Image (spheres, grey):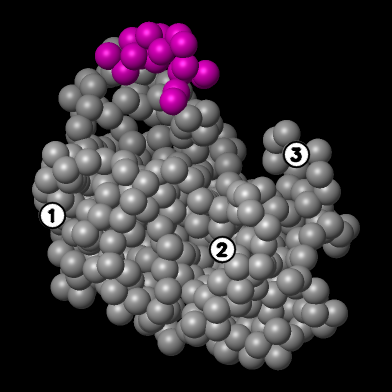
Amino acid sequence: MNAVTSIPDGPGVSPARTAALRAEAEALYLGTRPKTRAAAEAAAHLLDGVPMHWMVDWSTPVPLVIAQASGARLVDVDGHAYDDFCLGDTASLFGHGPAPVAQALARQATAGLATMLPSPDAALVGDLLAARFGLPYWQIATTATDANRFALRAARAATGRPRILVFDGAYHGAVDETFVEIGPDGRVGNRPALMGEPRDLATLTRVVPFNDLDALEAALADRTVACVIAEPVMTNCAMVLPQPGFHEGLREITRRHGTLLLIDETHTLSTGPGGYTRTHGLEPDMFVAGKAVAGGIPAAVWGMTEDVAERFRTARINRPDGHSGMGTTLSGSPLQLAALRANLEEVATEAAYAQMNRLADRMEAGLAQVLSEARLPWHVARCGARVEVVRAPFPLTDGRQAKAAHYPALEATTHLALLVRGVLISPFHDMMLASPATSQAQVDNLVAATRNVVERLVG
């Protein structure tokens, strides 16, 4: 590889090289995927040709259509195979279609899919969640967005307080009131990209920088904040790790001000069997996990301490008859419970995580070597089996820095160039996951493909 003697244009790559590699990758993609192009033309009655509109945010010139997903491997309708390091953006963290989950679903399909009543798996799932994540009481939702929404309502009901607090740059699904940010002028407002939202969400949502305990202290001082909702590691744009002492300070300050602490581990389940919370000894009042918790089946969980459960029960007893605004018909279904039980008992095991972390060690080391050889001002961040290339020279500390490390054109080019080399990573930033089904050869292929792409970018 040729060494780079100067670093142009901020992220270390010239726009001209980025554009050239993008054009080459697009031509190769379109020229070798006739069935993919035909599928895009046939989807006339889907908005933008996809079943969910953000699927057009992938870097491909027309949507990639997957015919089969198994383990850590995808095959598209044209027969091209891909080593999958996106894994459904964490939803398939343990691989596509883990056998125990697939078998549990097949059994449950003959016994009923939706009854709006508990199945025999319900009590056992509650026991499994309590043992794994450390909180005594649990509820089942269909998505992490739902779980976060319900948990925030429960927090407000339990405390009688109106406000919540989020960290700038964090992501908590499609919960409307979390789409706020600190603008360039220092003021809090709705995120500019948020569509169809006429309300000023900052009325009841406060925002402070991640890792800033002084700002957190000031924001909670008037004791009107019901709940702080936090990812233990921020994962939305570019990975932001907690500074030493941050989580200890977060817990102490929230307790002192009577504010509940909700830890959202939807992405950080990559850390270990009990998430970042168990690995690092966190003590949340409430806990949310979705995506991978049921092996890729639409299911999420939210848990609470004894104290929160009792305060929530009191609020429920004292409310008038009518809808609580919490829960959906398909939440807690026999299908979800069967998948949750199988995944927690047989798939997301200590042994599986040990294998995932061994592979992530190899991935982290290989990618770091590629960046070092190219003398790029980037680094590799890590959260268990989650590895990310961050386009900044040093670890990030807050959302402002994460936003500054985001280069959409360069990222899209990198993603597409990797794709045509048989490697799929996250469409939103340079995030990669190792699953129990991932092989060492696949990791080595990822590193080799990344090295080839970097060589094309830096010369």
Mark toward the viewer: 2 or 3: 2
Nearer the N terminus, badge 2 or badge 1?
1
Q: Position of residue 405 (x, y in %)?
A: 61, 56
Alpha carbon distance from label 1 to label 3: 42 Å
- Amino acid, disc 2: Ala
| Label annotation for residue 321 | none
For image coordinates 76% across by 61% down, the residue present is 205
Q: Which residue is mark 2?
A: 151
Q: In terms of secondary structure, where does tag 2 sit?
A: helix
| Label annotation for residue 197 | 3
Q: Which residue is mark 1?
A: 100
Magenta part mainly helix, strand or loop?
helix
- Amino acid, disc 3: Glu
Alpha carbon distance from label 2 to label 3: 22 Å
Seen in the picture, residue 433 relative to 455 is either above or below; the reply is below
Quarter-wise, where is residue 399 in the image?
Answer: bottom right
For image coordinates 42% across by 84% down, the residue present is 280
